[in-house]
Amino acid sequence: MPHFQTYLGALILCLALISVAGRDNKGNTAAPEAGTEAQAIVKRFAAGDIRGELVVFPEERPISAGGAVFAQIKLSTDATRGGNMAADLLIEAERGEIGAITGASGEVQDNGQAVRATVEGLRKGRDRMLQVEVKLPRMRSGRTSLKVTLNSPANARQAFTLASFQEATAEVFWDVRDCAGSYSNALRQIRDNPQWRPLERWRDASTPDPDLPRSWLFTPADPRSRLAVGLAEPETTGASPGRSEREVFAEADKLVRARKDPALDREGTLGWTLGKVAGDLETYLSQPSSPAVCAGAPGLVSYYRGRLEGLAQRGRQLTRLAADAKRLARWKVEVAFRAARELQRNRLRWGGGITPVTMKTMAVRGETLAGLTASLAELAAVPQPALSRIENAPSAYDALIRVAEVGLEREGVPYAIRDQVRAAFVALDAAARLELASQRHAALQSAFEGRLRAIRDAYAAHCVCQS
């Protein structure tokens, strides 16, 4: 519908004029009463027998570049002689363009930034209203003004006097900022940030990792139920992690078989959702700049955070299982060390010079999985050159790979502790898999959350214009 915004703006301004009250006879602005909403700003001017009012809304925030603002011109007279009167108006927009004028009854001459209009039919008790649309320029920041010049009445039936040739002006200003442009630039920077690329991270996470072996490094007797069957270990107590053991190994076995987190499969519900959200965010960040680009950003962030709740739940599950697996692994390592300490004194020595006597003072080193792996490798009589490589491995999983390459069946290691040592390595294998999956999940979630948080912050910083 042509000029719909113009008519809508006129309606809004008319409603505002109804509430204008409490102005003095000399002031140009209407001060709002305490506890009421801001009133319209009224600039008064007069030439000869014609009075004018230029009315706009006060703007608490900058106006968006490339948009439009509206003003209303009210003309009135108390003159009773000469019948109807006519007024000549020159309407100028600095750094802007006059979009449309409604209410002029005579000729309108328009050259873009300046419009000359004639308003006819003025007489006492018959006011005339004009609605002016100002199209704002696209610029980084600045001010745009609307200036109205009223010339004296031009009526052939009216006697010409000096007063008849008077003119008066009124002017209003708007602060203009390119909120849409600066927000679009911020979106492109977010899109290009390598830390916030969830689409790439999801594609990697949903594809089997070629660097991970297709099987367990240390195979449990039944990875989906118990760690091993028939091990001579202390009875499970309330302080031991036995109750979570089944869930830990069931989940670790899924990770081993898939060489990825199967919950992120592209064919699954969560995987499909992640791909859709990642693609939608990529499209949003790549959109061209437009005056409406700021619209709906907070709602978009809230909506997609809701869609990603499944990812957050999966992340919390993996974090919990990784913590449980680490406690289980440490407990298994301590079981192996305790079994070694309980060997009789006449047992044979084994690699590394460790004997039942030295075992009584030997303790598990470190709290990390890598530290536990190195401690257990020493107990398993891994040769010193290989032990140094294990201790310097970049991750727990790399350390376990190096142990597996050396092998556990070392000569001189008492058979009485071999089962406990292997069971501890199996637990470390499961813990390392879950730790790796949890870390990759956290990186994926961080990429999604980083983008959403960056969009929210960019909106708050740049989308400050009056809509």
Image (cartoon, helix red, strand yellow):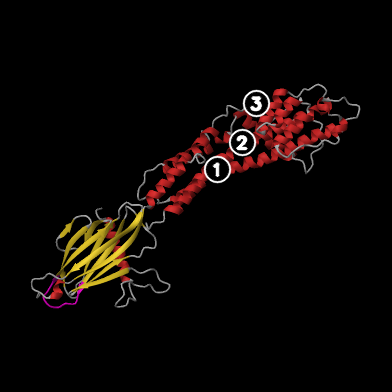
Identified by mark 3, the residue type is: Ser
Identified by mark 2, the residue type is: Ala
Q: Is residue 332 visible?
A: yes
For the point 14% across and 78% down, which residue is it?
Answer: 80
Q: Is residue 37 left or right of residue 237?
A: left
Secondary structure mostly taken by the magenta-highlighted segment of the chain: loop
Residue 302 percent location from the top left of the image? 49, 50
Residue 376 percent location from the top left of the image? 76, 31
> Are the residues at dot 1 and dot 3 in contact (C-beta closer than 8 Å)?
no
Residue 259 percent location from the top left of the image? 60, 29
Viewer-nearest residue: 196 or 333: 196
Q: Is residue 158 left or right of residue 175?
A: left
For the point 33% across and 61% down, which residue is it?
Answer: 174
Which of the labelled discs sits on residue 446, or is there none?
1
Which residue lies under the disc numbered 2? 437
For the point 14% across and 61% down, which residue is it?
Answer: 107
Viewer-nearest residue: 362 or 309: 362
- Tell me the element at label 1: helix
Judge whether 135 appears above or below 15 on screen. Answer: above
Q: Is residue 226 visible?
A: no
- Rounded to the nearest angstrom, the CA distance separating label 2 from label 1 is 14 Å
- Rounded to the nearest angstrom, the CA distance separating label 3 from label 2 is 16 Å
Identified by mark 1, the residue type is: Ser
- Tell me the element at label 2: helix
* Segment tinted magenta in the rendering: 76-85
The crowd level at tag 3 (other Cα within 10 Å; few <14, some 14-19, many 20+) is few
> Are the residues at dot 3 and dot 2 in contact (C-beta closer than 8 Å)?
no
Which residue lies under the disc numbered 3? 215
